[in-house]
Amino acid sequence: MNSYEVNADSTTLAPVESRSRPSILRKIVSKVTTKDGWLGDYDYSYLFLPNVPFMKRTRRPGPFFGLNDKMPIILSFILGFQHALAMLAGIVTPPIILAGTAGANLDTATEQYLVSASLICCGILSMVQITRFHVYKTKYYIGTGLISVVGTSFSTIPVASGAFTQMYKQGYCPVDADGNKLPCPDGYGALIGTSCLCALLEVFLSFAPPKALKKIFPPIVTGPTVLLIGVSLVGTAFEGWAGGSGSCMSRPDSGIYQLCPTIDAPHPLAWGSAQFIGLGFSVFVTILICEKWGSPIMKSCAVITGLLVGCIIAAACGYFDRSGIDAAPVATFIWKHTFKLSLYGPIVLPLLAVYLILMIEAMGDITATCDVSRLEIEGNGFESRIQGGVLADGINGLLAGLMTMTPMSTFAQNNGVISLTRCANRTVGYFCCFFLIIMGIFSKFAAALVSIPDSVLGGMTTFLFTSVAVSGMRIIATAPFTRRNRFILTSSLSVGIGAILVPDWFDYVFTYDGDNHALAGFLSAITLIMETGFALTAFLSVFLNLFISEDDNNEETDAVEIDALTSVQSESDNIEATTTIHTDNSNDDKAVQVEKIVL
């Protein structure tokens, strides 16, 4: 039986099947057999030509491509690859850290697998966000229908690092006779198993109205939390910049860790050596040069370009170890290595805090993606995209654990690529997913990433993690600096920053050493929360935001302005500031005006 649709004149019916199939076929043939279908009339020089110093040239920005606009195949291919490169550094960094000395101390083969699995998972799960599935017979969706790509979250790293430290102390993870940490795959399995369970929180919250979630988690709550996530990660990155974050940091007089990374490395040096510092600076300076003089495509890939330059220098100086690359298989896929899933109670509450942060980050990133994609950022359609994006984010967290990976988050840096290239077309997003999956399948690529020297990786991750902290500062800046908000910020940040600076400050509060494993696990959970700066800040800021009510007047803001005027008066001998306050009692309202008179 044929189906019919109403024609444009709304008076006749035309069979859909009889003309849709030939029409689609003609479009495909035209796409792949014509110059316009392959190249179009896009100005490709706009993407690739850099800003050469002392030379002026005019640039013609390309047209804007909406979600479903027609695009040349070559342009879709190039921009998809650009999105993949923009994500690459952020995707591979968490598994490298969590599989290394700051995490589960896994062997090289497993570490290579986790990098490959991270790339493959991000490609597959990004498709979920981009496609947007309708939940049958409901008003709900899964996914945003935008270029909302996902990557392995940085937010898990502080929680996981603290959890692994606790596991080694309590005997959950093994150590050798000298106290050196041994590989702990069961600990990693406990991390991803607990993550799968905690992901259900974000799934359930996705059905709540976005306005209610924003009221409970305003910028004054999420901003300082994201800020401290970045701050806590910079320390690990800086340790890597100086040579590594493992046992070689203490510069022992004997043993394999006398030099970094070990005495068996191709070019070992003492921790903090000038050569290590110089390698990290080569990455950092390259990122700055790309931002100043790079072409649009280079600016969006500045971090990975810096990493590439650092690797070239390191390879030329003999710092690379080829043994891992040579031993790696040609191809791999998810579940090539598996881990025993289990529940580790002490990290349940910290991971719940992580998923709350991921949910709020997703809402902000989806809003920004709608904005740069020139779509509405209010109304039912927008709220539907928010709901679908948050639900997909929670489901992706669950699926990531089942795919042997830690939680995923919606990546914000791709919004910059959309804005820079003026392209929000979903075809580009699918090309991006394709490239990520291909990079993950060819495990030699992952092996090359794992073999990057710590100092090179540290120069890159220092920049990446600091950008996370700056994102937190930007979120805080969106909130008015009233007296109430300043008090919440001060209270929540004080304990969070203290826990980061003195990470073992709560180690000796509980002295229980009995046989009650439930009680011991509960006390360990409290200790882990109190020693995880961003989790402590998150819980305290949520409580204070709900406990301390908003003031109805603006006396706090006025006081700040008066203080500023007083400061100007004290610092200048030639400027005199006077403040006149006029009170208008009409309509029972008090209006305070601050006038600055410069004589």
Image (cartoon, rainbow, N blue to C red):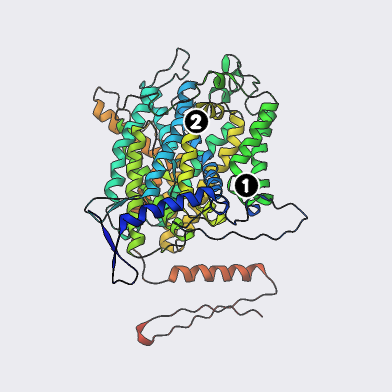
- Any mark on residue 63, and which? none
Task: Judge left or right: residue 245 versus residue 334.
Answer: right
Q: Residues within 10 Å of mark 1 (few under 14, many from 20)?
A: many
Q: Residues within 10 Å of mark 2 (few under 14, many from 20)?
A: many
Q: Quadrant of residue 176?
A: top left
Quarter of the rendering occupied by the C terminus: bottom right
Q: Nearer the viewer, residue 549 or 161?
A: 161
Q: Amino acid at mark 1?
A: Met
Query: For numbered disc 1, what is the local secondary structure?
Result: helix
Quote the CA–CA distance across marks 2 and 1: 24 Å
- Residue 123 seen: yes
Q: State the residue position of label 1.
A: 298
Query: For numbered disc 2, what is the local secondary structure?
Result: helix
Q: State the residue position of label 2.
A: 96
User: Against 267, is 376 above or below?
Assistant: below
User: Against 284, is 590 above or below?
Assistant: below
At 64% from the left edge and 21% from the top edge, which residue is drawn? Answer: 268
Q: Nearer the viewer, residue 349 or 408?
A: 408
- Residue 106 seen: no
